[in-house]
Amino acid sequence: MIVGNNSASRVYVDNKKKACAEIGIYSEEYALPEETTQEEILKIIDELNKKEDINGILVQLPLPKHIDEKAVINAIDPKKDVDAFHPVNVGKIMIGDFDFVPCTPAGVMELIKESGIDVQGKECVVIGRSNIVGKPQAMLLLHSNATVTICHSKTRDLKEVTKRADILVAAVGIAKFVKADMVKEGAVVIDVGMDRDENGKLCGDVDFEEVKNVAAAITPVPGGVGPMTIAMLMKNTVKSASIK
């Protein structure tokens, strides 16, 4: 479901539909105008919750300002919440007994695993504390036996904290925020950001050209975490089909 005319959201939804088509997942799109009421959205979600042939429901965020995002997320059946934003699924992530994981943090963990990087015992630093990325990312790293620090806008001596990281995850939402002097030599740097630089070019939260000379491994933007996010959405959807 997509509400309004957010151009970035349109791109994301199109990419998700394309991924579904490529691997044989049936998808329906509900493209609603900006002025759609909250009641209308909740009615559609209720109908989708009851449809046996729909296993996953995704409401593209952000929603228009007159819509209460929390109420919309809470209305989705937790067993169909393939974004893993519902409080039930968030709580399951906290205790480590989960069905779904938010797609971006899950994609980061899959990248780390497939790269042969052992998280156990490593010092991991996450810059950002959002409910969508920062917090669940920290929990997944913790479940993998890492020692985890979450940094944010109130963190003192940020550079000193990030320089301790064996694995640094940048999810702060500021273009090229992480510079080479914030990164330990030989660290693994994962860039979750999707920003625009001063020339309007797509970039991440990490200054790639600077940091690549310090890091042992680094993800690019675009082409790093982004495709993994969509892959994990597909994985969640397949899993949701098996949950009764």
Image: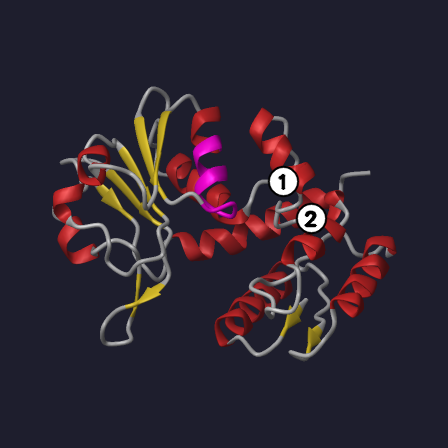
Residue 94 % position (x, y): 57, 29
Kindly identify which numbered label has been placed on residue 217.
none
Q: Which residue is mark 2?
A: 81
* Amino acid tagged 1: Phe
- In this rendered view, identify the residue nearer to me: 162 or 184: 162
Do residues under tags 2 and 1 come within 8 Å of each other at their CB atoms? yes
The answer to which quarter of the image holds residue 120 is: top left
**Between marks 2 and 1, how big is the CA–CA gap?**
8 Å
* Image quarter of the N terminus: bottom right
Residue appearing at x 57%, y 40% in the figure: 101
Residue appearing at x 70%, y 70% in the figure: 29
Residue appearing at x 56%, y 64% in the figure: 62
Residue 49 % position (x, y): 82, 54
**Is residue 199 depicted above or below 89 in this figure?**
below
**Is residue 107 depicted above or below 22 in this figure?**
above
Which one is earlier in the sequence, the residue at label 2 or at label 1?
2
- In this rendered view, identify the residue nearer to me: 124 or 62: 62
The answer to which quarter of the image holds residue 117 is: top left
For residue 137: magenta?
yes
Residue appearing at x 71%, y 54% in the figure: 71
* Image quarter of the C terminus: top right
The answer to whether one can see residue 214 in this image is no
